[in-house]
Image (cartoon, helix red, strand yellow):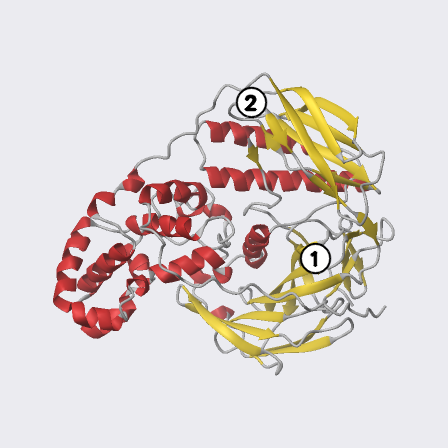
Amino acid sequence: MRRISLVAGLALLLSACEFSLAGDLTPPPDALAFGQATPEPILAPAASPDLQAGAGLYMQSCAPCHGAGGLGDGEQAGQLPFAPAPLGDAGLARAASPAGWFRWVSEGRLPRYMPPFASVFTPQERWDVLAFAYSLSLEASDLRSGAALYLQYQDQVDELLDGDRLTAQISLIEALGLSEGEAGALIAYLQAQALGIEEEDLGLGDASPTPASMVDLPEFGSFTGNVLYGGDGVLPAELEATLAGYDHAEQVFSATMELGEDGRFLFEEVPLAPERIFFVQVSYQGQIYFSEFITARGDETNFEIPITVYETTTSTQQLAVESLQLFFDFSKPDVVRVAQQVFISNLGDRVVVPQADDFPVLHFSIPPNANNLAFQEGELGERYVVDATGFGDLRGVLPGANSYQLLFAYELPYTDSLSFQVQFDLPTRSLVAFLPKGEIKLLTEEFQQAGSETIDGVPYSVYASEPGYFPGDEVQLTLSGPHPFWGLRLDKLISDDSLLLGLAALTAAVGAAWLWVRSLPTANTEQILEEIAVLDERYERGGIPKAAYNKRRAALKARLRALLNKGKRK
């Protein structure tokens, strides 16, 4: 059985709409209590990295973008605003340390639009992947030359690296005065030693991934689970669960049963078939909750599917913004594109829903002279409602930390300076700004520089302000400096929606909650179900790595749920 998580994939496209835009809440005492995750320390691998295991994980999760040989030519590479890093390029690999790559894999690379994998792979699996990725750039001749150079410069090298080969990168040994080729060979050897890579391991990436094999399915199976109650007390009575099964675009199975007193449901003698998609849905208080999608594989016949339902409320008092992040993009002349990403926690135990079909749950203020508003998902007039100061979102907010994320962008005119107000509609813990380094400065005093990162030679500055904000608060952001568009190299420019597209990948990695569906629409769902079926067939033929398959299937699932959501509101 393969269970698909509620996270969308990387290739979410944006819908853009162009226009111009001309109750005070008291936060709960702990509204600002949630902090940001503490970076995971870089520890040496607990065991020597397993390149064979790393190869499998790489093909599943990395090859779709970076390519099987690490050349940045994966099948999804063309969908991204930046070309994926060519991990198999020797110059790139020698310039980065294994410790640095481990952190990037764990935490993601936000400016480069790489999602984090700390919640996907264990630390050992991340080291396995890195070892395989480094092996793609290594040559046996370099390892031999590097070994000889290390014997010659061992004391100096150990001192420069402070004895830690996981930090080995070419810039750290410049003091040795080696030629470029010698320095590259020495670092190649040190990195290989740090990751346990030997000559016999090279060339592992030349082998194609083993196609997934299908086992004949049993004829029938059973689907069981509990409907869990997210409120106080016991699960309300007289709820029903419906199990649906789809072959491609056609619904081929449906059964409904009343839940037991304990919320238990059981569907027996359910006919199974290859690539048949099953899910359970439960309706409660005008909302329909869906289970994970399940496809029967192998010889399993019993499938467990839990679902949680909640009471509803129209009060937003239980909501708090964990982080409001602003990303500034100067890739178009005379304007700055501001991508705004919001992470919201529902601190209560009820789903926050609209007071009416056209009354938004959340409101987001944007500057009055903003243009070209675009969203990661959803459209104005459907999910979003415009007003004089911004827009509102009709989607409900499930209980939990960071249960709601929204990504949108707009453009503001920019010549040599810009001032605009960020308005807070909910209690907000932190405000973070990402600004390309250069002549443009962020002059707002309450921001503190929180670090910087250099990506492909382009430095970015990160600014943070964490005093905590309350509804009605405002922060005046002031940028000053000449527009850098005309100073950018053409190969460094990014498309208009690059920030949204890239940040959508990050949002997807964090995860997206959904609800607001009331009936199963027919329009467009068939196409998505057909795409799921084709994707499943391709995966079973071994034509797509496991992780890429999981991500794409999850993205299709999210799209289907969005359509269901849209159809139920009509």
Image quadrant where residue 144 sits: bottom left
Quadrant (top left, top right, bottom left, bottom right) of the C terminus: top right
**Marks 2 and 1, how far apart in space?**
45 Å
Q: Which residue is mark 2?
A: 274
The one nearer the camera, 535 or 119, is: 119
Tell me, yes or no, if residue 494 can be seen here: yes
Q: Residue at x 60, y 47 (%)?
A: 13
Quick one: label 1, few (<14), some, or many (20+) residues within 10 Å?
few
- The number of numbered discs placed on residues in the rendered structure image is 2
**Residue 18 has which mark?**
1
Quadrant (top left, top right, bottom left, bottom right) of the N terminus: top right
Q: Residue at x 46, y 49 (%)?
A: 121
Decide if residue 316 is on the left or right side of residue 164. Answer: right
User: Element at badge 1?
Assistant: loop
Name the spot of residue 323 as percent of width and height, x first. Answer: 64, 65
Q: Is residue 436 above or below residue 202?
A: below
The one nearer the camera, 411 or 456, is: 456
Q: Amino acid at mark 1?
A: Glu
The residue at the far right in this view is 356
Decide if residue 133 is on the left or right side of residue 112. Answer: left
Name the spot of residue 560 as percent of width and height, x first. Answer: 67, 38
The residue at the far bottom in this view is 445
**Mark 2 touching mark 1, by CB under 8 A?**
no
**Residue 563 has which mark?**
none
The one nearer the camera, 340 or 51, is: 51
Name the spot of residue 432 as percent of width and height, x first. Answer: 60, 70
Quick one: label 2, few (<14), some, or many (20+) residues within 10 Å?
some
Q: Amino acid at mark 2?
A: Pro
Q: Is residue 469 above or below residue 541?
A: below
